[in-house]
Structures are given as C-alpha cells and as structure tokens.
Image: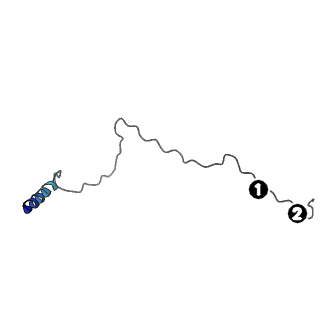
Amino acid sequence: MRRLVASSLCALAVAASGCGLKGPLYLPEKPGEVVVRPAPGTTPPATPAEPATTTPATPAPPPPQAPPTGPGARG
C-alpha cells in the first residue's frame, strides 16, 4: 500500500512539473532600444523638482570685534 501511494505521488509530481510550459526554451534577443509608454488612462509621473538649497532664515550676526590694542588705543 505504501509503495502504491509513493509511486502515485511521484507520478503526480512529474506530471504537474510540466504544467504551463509550452514551446521550446530559448533566450530572446536583446532589443536595441527600450521604449516605455504609460498605460492608457494614467498620468505621467511629475518631473523631479530642483533640489532645495538650505538657506538660513536670518543671517548670522557678525563675530564680536576685539577691542583695539596698541599705542593709539584709548582706554
């Protein structure tokens, strides 16, 4: 009985492995140019915008100046 079930399962697996295969197997030729067209009724994707540049909202304050030093300095 076990042998009958095992051989039946093997025969079923062999028969099912060929399902959906039609015609000879071959490698298709590579096309020279690929043309992509949108499906009817769809809108093309928006073009990417320019990359945003980060600019500060207000300019940074200038660095503090050192007090004058030297012979003509007041102080």
Q: Residue at x 9, y 59 (%)?
A: 5
Give the secondary structure at mark 1: loop
Q: CA distance from mark 2 to mark 1?
A: 18 Å
**Nearer to me, 52 or 57:** 57
**Over which residues does the magenta segment extend?**
55-72
All told, the count of numbered labels is 2
Residue 61 within the magenta-colored segment of the rendering? yes
Residue 71 falls in image quadrant: bottom right
Amino acid type for the residue under numbered disc 1:
Pro
Residue reaching furthest to the top: 41
Image quarter in which the C terminus is found: bottom right
Residue 36 falls in image quadrant: top left
Residue topped by disc 2: 69
Q: Residue at x 9, y 61 (%)?
A: 7
Residue 10 within the magenta-colored segment of the rendering? no
Q: Residue at x 38, y 37 (%)?
A: 42
Residue 40 in picture, x, y percent from top left: 34, 36
Residue topped by disc 1: 63
Q: What secondary structure predominates along the stretch shown in magenta?
A: loop
Residue reaching furthest to the bottom: 71
Image quarter in which the N terminus is found: bottom left
Q: Is residue 66 above or below residue 35?
A: below
Q: Tell me, what colour scheme is on the image?
A: rainbow
